[in-house]
Amino acid sequence: MTTAATVALVTGANKGIGYEIAARLGALGWRVGVGARDAGRREEAVEKLRAGGADAFGVALDVTDQASVDAAAAGLDQLDVLVNNAGIIGGTPQVPSTVDLAVVQAAVDTNVYGVIRVTNAMLPLLRRSPRPRIVNMSSSVGSFAEQTDPQGPLSGMPASVAYAPSKAFLNAVTVQYAKELRDTAILVNAGCPGYCATDLNHHSGFRTPEQGAAIAVHLATLPDDGPSGGFFDDEGPVRW
Ligand SMILES: NC(=O)c1ccc[n+]([C@@H]2O[C@H](COP(=O)([O-])OP(=O)(O)OC[C@H]3O[C@@H](n4cnc5c(N)ncnc54)[C@H](OP(=O)(O)O)[C@@H]3O)[C@@H](O)[C@H]2O)c1
């Protein structure tokens, strides 16, 4: 008996951690949709993934644009795993007392509303899958416990009222999807890739994008009795 390949969609897969997630899922023999908003960057990534042996295809997708998200969903006839990876730091400065509200809105639009837009458009497809998984790429900067721990590494970071709270919002959203979907086969979790050198942070991270992809692959391949509504990194659960 032949089984249809698992199909995954990774948003923001043209570069950085998302590209590496697509490469790792492709290496599992899965068909991988490369969600990306720029046609040139998307096709370049698809070609590179194919050259590496992956069954990759491009999906035009701007997570801030409902029409683009709807068209992406309409173009798919199977989806088993959704990795909501697209994200932005957003404009600066993000100092709470002086921030331009447009900076906060832009971060939330991509990092939170984008996830809701894409997830809701893809849910009808995911509900038809025998092993549906949703992975939301979050960050430990969205953890209240980490942000308020005076001994922790985040205590020394400058205060940010856009990017960090957008990831806290995303964590809360993840929990609520898991709650709604708890009687289905869909497992929904948030993952933190660690501090990885990508364009997002001007390559200041000390981990590689390949290392950052590992938690997403882990959560994308959870067994049927795996967790849902959790927040994890390579070491295990992350404090909320
Ligand atoms: N790097 C880290 O240390 C780190 C740590 C914790 C969490 N994360 C999270 O991991 C995820 C990936 O980050 P990264 O470091 O790989 O960043 P990156 O290299 O800057 O890549 C971000 C990706 O998101 C895409 N994107 C941004 N806005 C989009 C939109 N409106 N529609 C579609 N795609 C969009 C980008 O596409 P374009 O090329 O078109 O801009 C790019 O493909 C993000 O959610 C980030 O918050 C990263």
Image (cartoon, rainbow, N blue to C red):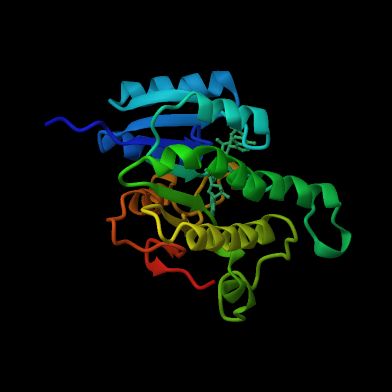
Q: Residue at x 62, y 81 (%)?
A: 150
Q: How many marks?
A: 0
Q: Is residue 73 toward the left or the right of residue 51 in the image?
A: right
One can see residue 92 in this view: no
Point 43% across, 61% down: residue: 182
Q: Position of residue 239 (x, y in %)?
A: 50, 73
Horizontal side of 127 relative to 156 (left or right) equals left
Establish if 21 lies above or below 33. below
User: Quick check: 239 left or right of 218?
Assistant: right
The front one of 197 and 162 is: 162
> Dividing the image into four equal quarters, which quarter contains ligand 1?
top right
For the C terminus, give its image quadrant: bottom right
Q: Is residue 155 visible?
A: yes
The residue sitting at the left extreme is: 1
* Image position of 188 with respect to 203: above or below: below
Residue 113 point in image, percent of width and height: 66, 47
Above or below, 9 relative to 163: above
Q: Which residue appears at 32% of the width and 61% of the height?
A: 226
Q: Position of residue 16 (x, y in %)?
A: 50, 39
Give the camera-side residue of 196 and 23: 23
Image coordinates of residue 67 in percent, x first then y, are 66, 28
Q: Quadrant of the N terminus?
A: top left
Residue drawn at (46%, 54%) of the image = 193
Q: Splitting the image into 4 quarters, where does residue 36 fall?
A: top right
